[in-house]
Image: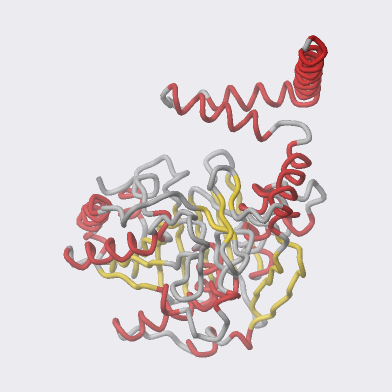
């Protein structure tokens, strides 16, 4: 019996020593940077629980050997045939696609978000711009996506359906891209990345095409050579094989998730832009063609770790999410002027839309600290205001305007 307890005591001491060694190593390698991140997390007037959560996230993201541990853990889950990780934060469907989810019982009531959009529409009525909600697709594709029994489902599509019905009651126009891009030239398996929550660049191009088709049909939209600009034959496609590790792949480890191909789509025709960005801390301007002005080379040239967020290829379009951005197309003098209030799904779609617009303004409610209504009313001669969030972004975080 004594020998049994001695073994347990030795194991406990060894475990504590291991944790202590890793903690000291972590402080040695990341101590100063970690402290700055923690101080930053405690700013911005957040409440105590939010500050603690931010601190925990910073400490987790700066832990030494973090991704090696993620790889080992993910490989173990793969060997055991597990279809979920991190207490069901990420699950895998029967086609091998990863999903963010949670246990839901029914669609959420988001009528308050529709109220906020209605109030915003009333406050910007003086612009004479048409306010349109653009619903981008959810990764759960009805008839294609299948989950094993017992895995959670968040009812995001059903929530989106209810939201669009709420918009109809309030006489707010919307364009639903969820069905528009299916059966439109690419297979369901190519609409989303396996390791990421975003649609593929190919799907975003279909979304751009569908958006213009709907505008033309509803508003008799005159766009010169629209068929030319929406024809993928007039764009260069370069595919980086097994190069992309998306947001969920970074959580589960590449041994579990695998890697995605990533296709960069850029115009073959001449382009000339000025792109201005402001992320709240820095602002800068880039002039040149599509490839230079609207497409960041940094993720493709990044030499850091494979899980480094700076290597996120999806964020190459428009240099990732910015608090505010403005695309000016010098090749289209009298084209459309539009504003996007958006999430990250819009990045590639707005890039493609820029080929037929004079000006595109973009604002992300998560990062823009000033009043979006005031910004909208200050922009010159807008034709359309697109509010566009994917079904899982129907939350108060994104609708921080209008109310």
Residue 165 picture quarter = bottom left
Q: Residue at x 58, y 67 (%)?
A: 94
Can you say whether 208 is above or below 123 in the image? below
Q: Whole-percent x and y of residue 86?
A: 59, 43
Of residue 35 and residue 254, the one placed in the foreground of this image is 254
**Is 19 left or right of 328, judged from the image as shown?**
right
**Is 247 left or right of 345, judged from the image as shown?**
right
Q: Residue at x 75, y 21 (%)?
A: 19
Can you say whether 310 is above or below 187 in the image? above
Residue positioned most to the front: 1
Q: Looking at the figure, which quarter contains the N terminus?
A: top right
Can you say whether 103 is above or below 386 in the image? above
Of residue 232 and residue 155, the one placed in the foreground of this image is 155
Q: Whole-percent x and y of residue 104?
A: 38, 51
Residue 188 picture quarter = bottom right
Q: Whole-percent x and y of residue 156?
A: 39, 59
**Is 116 left or right of 8, judged from the image as shown?**
left
Q: Residue at x 45, y 60 (%)?
A: 361
Q: Whole-percent x and y of residue 354?
A: 52, 71
Task: Give the color scheme: rainbow, by chain, secondary structure or one colour.
Answer: secondary structure
**How many discs appear?**
0
Q: Looking at the figure, which quarter contains the C terminus?
A: top left
Of residue 149 and residue 18, the one placed in the foreground of this image is 149
Q: Residue at x 35, y 48 (%)?
A: 372
């Amino acid at each position: 019996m004594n020998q049994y307890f001695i073994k347990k005591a030795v194991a406990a001491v060894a475990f504590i020593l291991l944790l202590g060694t890793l903690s000291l190593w972590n402080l040695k390698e990341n101590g100063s940077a970690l402290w700055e991140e923690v101080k930053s997390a405690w700013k911005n007037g957040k409440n105590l629980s939010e500050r603690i959560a931010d601190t925990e996230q910073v400490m987790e993201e700066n832990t030494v050997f973090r991704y090696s541990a993620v790889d080992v853990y993910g490989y173990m889950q793969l060997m055991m045939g597990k279809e979920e990780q991190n207490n069901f934060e990420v699950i895998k469907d029967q086609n091998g696609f990863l999903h963010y989810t949670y246990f839901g019982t029914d669609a959420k009531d988001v009528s308050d978000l529709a109220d906020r959009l209605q109030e915003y529409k009333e406050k910007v009525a003086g612009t004479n711009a048409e306010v349109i909600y653009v619903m981008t697709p959810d990764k759960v594709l009805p008839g294609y996506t299948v989950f094993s029994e017992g895995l959670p489902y968040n009812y995001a599509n059903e929530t989106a359906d209810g939201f669009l019905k709420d918009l109809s009651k309030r006489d707010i126009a919307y364009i639903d891209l969820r069905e528009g891009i299916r059966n439109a030239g690419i297979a369901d398996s190519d609409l989303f990345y396996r390791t990421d929550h975003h649609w593929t660049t190919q799907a975003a191009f279909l979304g751009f095409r569908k958006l213009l088709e709907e505008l033309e049909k509803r508003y008799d939209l005159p766009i010169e050579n629209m068929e030319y600009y929406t024809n993928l034959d007039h764009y260069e496609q370069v595919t980086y094989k097994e190069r992309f590790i998306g947001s969920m792949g970074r959580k589960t480890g590449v041994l579990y998730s695998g890697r995605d191909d990533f296709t960069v789509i850029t115009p073959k025709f001449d382009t000339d832009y000025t792109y201005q960005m402001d992320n709240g801390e820095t602002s800068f301007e880039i002039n040149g063609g599509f490839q230079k002005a609207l497409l960041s080379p940094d993720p493709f040239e990044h030499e850091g770790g494979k899980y480094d967020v700076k290597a996120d290829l999806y964020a190459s379009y428009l240099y990732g999410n910015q608090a505010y951005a403005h695309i000016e197309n010098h090749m289209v003098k009298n084209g459309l002027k539009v504003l996007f209030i958006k999430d990250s799904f819009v990045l590639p779609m707005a890039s493609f839309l820029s080929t037929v617009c004079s000006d595109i303004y973009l604002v992300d409610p998560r990062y823009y600290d000033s009043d979006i209504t005031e910004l909208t009313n200050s922009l010159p001669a807008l034709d359309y205001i697109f509010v566009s969030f994917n079904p899982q972004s129907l939350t108060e975080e994104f609708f921080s305007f209008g109310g």
